[in-house]
Amino acid sequence: MALLAKQISPPNLSIMQDEGFTVARVRTELLSGLTVALALVPEAVAFAFVAGVHPLVGLYAAFMVGLITAVFGGRPGMISGATGALAVVMVALVAQHGVEYLFATVVLMGILQIIAGVMHWGKFIRLVPHPVMLGFVNGLAIVIFLAQLTQFKDPENTEAWLASSQLVMMLGLVGLTMLIIWGTPKITAIIPAPLAGIGIVAALVIAVGIDVPTVGDMASIKGGFPSFHNPFGSGEGLYGAALAPFTLETLWIILPYAVILAAIGLIESLLTLNLVGEITGKRGGASQECIAQGASNVVTGFFGGMGGCAMIGQSMINVKSGGRTRIAGIAAALFLLAFIVVASPLIEQIPLAALVGVMFMVVIGTFAWNSFKVMTKVPLMDAFVIVLVTVVTVMTDLAIAVVVGVIVSALAYAWNNARRIHAYTRESESDKGAKVYEIEGPLFFGSTDGFIELFDVAGDPDHVIVDFARSRVVDQSALQAIEALAGKYEAEGKSLVLRHLSRDCHQLLTKAGHLMVDSDDDPDYEVAVDYSVKTGILGGH
């Protein structure tokens, strides 16, 4: 699966984008939204349990985050809601300070994400290398798969599997759902395959009275419309928790959590944005997505929700079901609200096996199976990064995995470039008796030692020219290396000249205070600068 981090201009906000506004298209979008909403219910409830909050806190978050990002987000087709990556961070805060501090944290988290969007920091997602993206989707597929295994556990004893008869029936229904999803597109395209799988299996279980776990066995999803709630103040708030005082002390408590949650949410959302964009052919929108995610979390925090970010599993369900516009995401959020308010008795009868079957098909579609072939053809370090990111994703979380992958890739890149520095020597045509070193490769912190070793200070003539036409001075370490080299030639009573520095290298040397006297002896670049009267080093464009 080709996954490339692409950032272009934000997409048009029109609801239908470039799709034709037809009855068939609207029907596809609505059915896709219904499918996503059904899959969102057990996910939101499960993540609420992980965070240690009431199920409605997760459901309200899925509704509000999903609705706002569907309307204003940077990528039509993406689905957002409460996620496990955020829930595992929230649990410590809730356990120590209560759910009201979580709501306050979610508000601050949203503000930080809005700032990131306004500052256009989302563009830095392009720095995520392709091997990291492959490892990300593979690890996420495994995480989604492992998360579904909890549905095969005894609700009263999560350490034990279901009884053998129930387990066999559960596996059979999961297999049936997957078979229906696989076969439906071969018969008709009118109904999204995941919706057909859920509907047929649910009807079978209800009609025959098969005893398998249902959505209602997890928790009741019945509730009302979310209402405005200020988490800041004194006294008792929702669910019997104490409100968070609007003080500096509260800020120091929630700030670390808010920063971590904002970072995790944006990383997961922007990677999902790129993945969905690769499938749908849409580009750009990173900053717009950051702002939409932030706004949704600010609102959610004031309406009793646990916050959220993009959900790659539900996004894959949506795009695979034909959802390509904002209508699908909006419909999913509204359907979810309808389930909470009026349809909870019906939704609670849906067997978990049907939803697990849908998620298993998502796992199959998400995992980059061609990565096994890719790893045999790419450099060994890239293959290592794919495996590393996959493992770290499964063992920790997505944000840490991506950061680790980027750091390892950057170090590998720096090491490879450090070995590229070399030089060709010749006699100067214009300055008889002078020796010219033509440098190739970047001069930066990793290559400074190799740069110094290129020169034969003792054996060189009295006049030496260093030509940087095919090189680049990158950082302060490079400047120090040049100074050290100049000192060695000065100690031998010899002169050293720098030529053909690029414009940005020249500016770097000037800013460092090393270029002082202008001259005009560099016809190629029109400007040459005397590096130091004392050492005789010259630098030019």
Image (cartoon, rainbow, N blue to C red):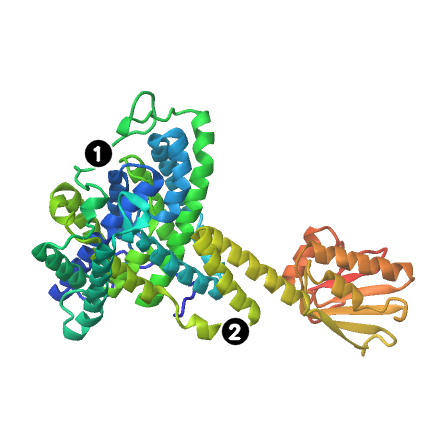
Residue 440, by quadrant, is bottom right
148 relative to 410 in the view: left or right: left
Residue 109, by quadrant, is top left
Numbered mark located on residue 124 in the image: none
Q: Position of residue 438 (x, y in %)?
A: 74, 73
Which quadrant of the figure contains the C terminus?
bottom right
* Along the line of sight, the residue nearer the viewer: 1 or 331: 1
How many other residues sit within 10 Å of disc 2, few (<14), some (14-19) or many (≥20)? few
44 relative to 290 in the view: left or right: left
Residue extending furthest toward the front: 164
Res 49 seen here: yes
- Determine whether the residue tagged by mark 2 lies in a helix, strand or loop: loop
> Disc 1 designates what residue?
227
> Disc 2 designates what residue?
378
Under mark 2, the amino acid is Val
Residue 294, by quadrant, is top left
Under mark 1, the amino acid is Ser
Q: Residue at x 66, y 60 (%)?
A: 505
- Determine whether the residue tagged by mark 1 lies in a helix, strand or loop: loop
Q: Is residue 124 above or below residue 248?
A: below
Discs 2/1, front: 2
Query: Are the residues flagged by discs 2 and 1 in contact, CB closer than 8 Å?
Result: no
* Along the line of sight, the residue nearer the viewer: 244 or 6: 244
